Amino acid sequence: MAKIKPTGDMVLVQHYTTQTVNGIILAEQKNDKFQQGMVVSINTDNNPMKLKIGNHVIFGGSPATTFIADKKSYSLLKQHDIFAKIE
């Protein structure tokens, strides 16, 4: 995937996936109330971010722009749409 650098207060999150016993990979459903993932890119230009690359987060499904690249699911969303960090 080409390097994606969010602008403003946007954050790029890679969704967690689940693998079944038979090896089928399932992405979380977009219509789930909450989703989990890992921050993979943030804007570092003159913008104070509370999140860092590698943070594991919980976010809402509806306000995000979701897409698939290199067989992985991503969401691009505003920092304030992330509800919590998982530590």
Image (cartoon, helix red, strand yellow):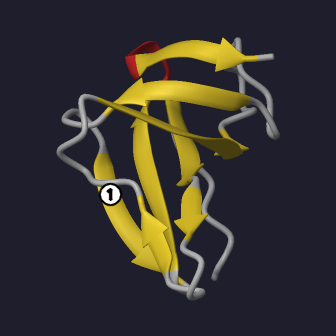
Residue at position x 76%, y 30% in the image: 55
Residue at position x 32%, y 57% in the image: 66
* In the displayed structure image, the side of residue 66 where residue 69 appears, left or right: right
- Quadrant of the image for the C terminus? top right
* In the displayed structure image, the side of residue 3 where residue 9 appears, left or right: left
Q: Nearer the viewer, residue 17 or 44?
A: 17
- Quadrant of the image for the N terminus? bottom right
* In the displayed structure image, the side of residue 31 where residue 60 appears, left or right: right
Q: Is residue 64 above or below residue 70?
A: above
Question: Which residue was labeled with disc 1?
Answer: 66
Residue at position x 19%, y 35% in the image: 62
Image coordinates of residue 52 in percent, x first then y, are 79, 28
Q: Is residue 68 above or below residue 70?
A: above
SS for callout 1: strand
Residue 72 is at least partly visible in this image: yes
Image coordinates of residue 69 in percent, x first then y, are 50, 80
Image coordinates of residue 12 in percent, x first then y, are 55, 47
Image coordinates of residue 31 in percent, x first then y, are 17, 45
